[in-house]
Amino acid sequence: MGRQGILPADGPVEIGGVSLPAGARKYSVDDRQIVAWVTNDPVPDAGARWLSLSAARAESGLVPVLLQADPPALRAPGGEPFFGFFHRAPVALMDQMPAASVLAAAWDEKVMLSGPADDGAQAPFGRLFPGLAPAQRAATSPDALRRVAGALPPAYLGLVPAGRPADVPAAVGWSVFGSDFSGPDPLSPDFCLPGARSLKIGAVLRSWEERYGARLLRLGADAILQVLAERPPRTTADAIALAAEHYAFANEAGGVPADSVEAIAARLTNATVWTFWWA
């Protein structure tokens, strides 16, 4: 294993006792920075290896993430797989972006854009964001998490030098829209820089890490992001409170359009894998 937080060289590697097949360092498209090391091919037992690499993160300084590439038919002949790495964003800015502010701004935008057909979408809440859901303490057993991870489909496996899993989207410049200059930020009307959306995503993921033990699991060129939650909501009331955040966070949550808090909540109780999609 190399130095902490240093990406391995191209080729097969072993990190924290986990052997990985050959891979290579990857660059962001816009700013041409090395942002990750990724296996050359999908790994059959990617979920199990992700779990083991996550346990080794404190020693390695590298955050594992499962990756979905673009369809081969969309690439130029001989083109490499693409994972949505566009433009890195300054991770430190997330310190100034409370998750409650990010989600409240996104909630307000959805309410503003909703029409008569969307009446009741925020039920049982009103038109104001209800605030962050309470933290959960009941942890899923390690054996159950291993079963969930072991059942995941094959995936490319990436390693990212980052302080925590929530920082990965910004660190690799992940975007579902190409070069992303989104804004404004809830705290500054002038906030508009490359990777702004990945910062907002990361700010929310940081909060979920703290309240639910929810670690980034998967990113993809298909605009899908997944997290693995060790402490998911256990009651209907707690699921509804969290569903308000998922409603504001993405266009789809849990495989259904994020246009109804109650529809999202129906899939959240005891759910360890949370799936999101952006249009």
Image (cartoon, grey):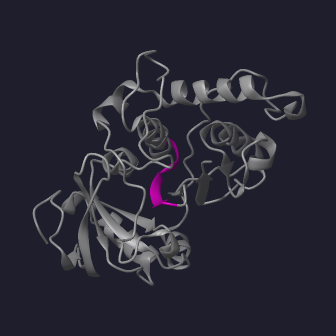
Q: Position of residue 187 (x, y in %)?
A: 45, 17
When asked about the image quadrant of residue 156, the answer is bottom left
Task: Point out the residue furthest to the top here.
Answer: 189
Q: Which residue appears at 50% of the width and 49% of the height?
A: 176
Can residue 19 be spotted in the picture?
no
Task: Point out the residue furthest to the front here.
Answer: 77
Q: Position of residue 162 (x, y in %)?
A: 27, 50
The stretch drawn in magenta includes residue 99: no
- Count of labels in the image: 0
The image shows residue 23, relative to residue 129, as above or below, that is below
Q: Which residue appears at 20% of the width and 62% of the height?
A: 60
Q: Which residue appears at 80% of the width and 43% of the height?
A: 262
Task: Point out the residue furthest to the left here.
Answer: 3
Q: Position of residue 275 (x, y in %)?
A: 60, 57
Q: Position of residue 40 (x, y in %)?
A: 32, 78
Left or right of 6? Residue 183 is: right
Q: Which residue appears at 50% of the width and 20% of the height?
A: 186
Q: Which residues are magenta?
A: 211-221
Left or right of 254? Residue 28 is: left
133 or 262, which lies in front? 262
Q: Classify the position of the N terminus by image quarter.
A: bottom left
The image shows residue 277, relative to residue 116, as above or below, that is below
215 or 84, which lies in front? 84
Can residue 30 be spotted in the picture?
yes
Dominant secondary structure (helix, strand or loop) of the stretch shown in magenta: strand
30 or 166, which lies in front? 30
The image shows residue 169, relative to residue 249, as above or below, that is below
When asked about the image quadrant of residue 255, the answer is bottom right
